[in-house]
Image: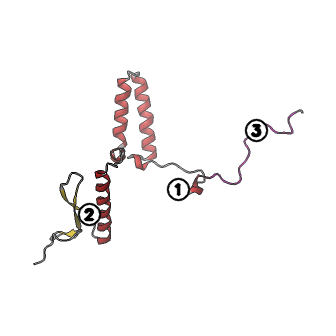
Amino acid sequence: MTNHWEGNPYRRPNSPLWHIVDEDQSGVVRRRSTKTKDLRIAREFLATTLREVELQKAGRTDPFAEARTRPVNEFVVEFKQHLEAERCAPRHVSATLKQIRAFLAFAKITTIPSITTPTPNGSSPGSGPSAARRPATTTPPRCAPSAAGSNG
C-alpha cells in the first residue's frame, strides 16, 4: 500500500491536484492545495511559500501586502467615511465619489496592482530603462521665444 501523504508536494488520494505541507511563522503545520496538476508549478509554489515564511520569521514583511489584495471599492468607502468625518459638504462628498467611481469604472480598476501607467514611448511598464527615456527627436515648445523675433 502506497502512503499518499509522503513527499512534498504530494497528491491526495483521488485528487488530480498537488498539495503541500509547510509550517507557518508560528510553527503550525499547514496542508494546502496548490490548485495545479503540474508538479513543477507545485514545487515553485512550495518554494515561494517557504521563502515567505522565512521572511516573516525574520521580521521582513510587506506592510502593504493586505492593501494590494483589497478591492479598490473598500478604499473608496473608507475615503467617503474620511470626508464625512472631516465634515465636508455633502455635495462635495457625492461629487468627489462620483468622479472617483466613474474613473475606476472607465479604467477597469479592481485592485491596486491592476493600476498601470503608460510610459512615454508607449511600451509596457517595467520593460527596462529605455521605457523611461524620451524619444531622441522632440519638437520645440510652441511658447518658446524665437531668436528672430527679438530686438537686440
Magenta residues: mostly which secondary structure? Answer: loop
Whole-percent x, y for residue 46 in the image? 28, 63
Element type at mark 3: loop
State which quarter of the image contains the N terminus: bottom left
Q: Which residue is mark 2?
A: 35
Relative vertical location of residue 118 with respect to residue 152 in this rendering, above or below: below
Residue type at mark 1: give it: Ser
Q: Disc 2 or 3, which lies upstream in sequence?
A: 2
Q: Disc 1 or 2, which lies upstream in sequence?
A: 2
Whole-percent x, y for residue 119 in the image? 56, 51
Q: Disc 1 or 3, which lies upstream in sequence?
A: 1
Residue under the image location 32 percent in, 67 percent down: 41
Element type at mark 1: loop
Relative vertical location of residue 150 with respect to residue 23 in this rendering, above or below: above
Element type at mark 2: loop
**Highlighted magenta segment, given as a residue range:** 133-150
Task: State the CA–CA distance, disc 1 to disc 3.
Answer: 32 Å
Residue type at mark 2: give it: Lys
Residue under the image location 15 percent in, 72 percent down: 4
Whole-percent x, y for residue 25 in the image? 24, 52
Whole-percent x, y for residue 132 in the image? 58, 52
Mark number, residue 144: 3
Say whether residue 39 is magenta. Answer: no
- Residue closest to the far front: 58
Q: Which residue is mark 1?
A: 124
- For disc 2, the neighbor class at 10 Å (few under 14, some 14 to 19, many from 20) is few
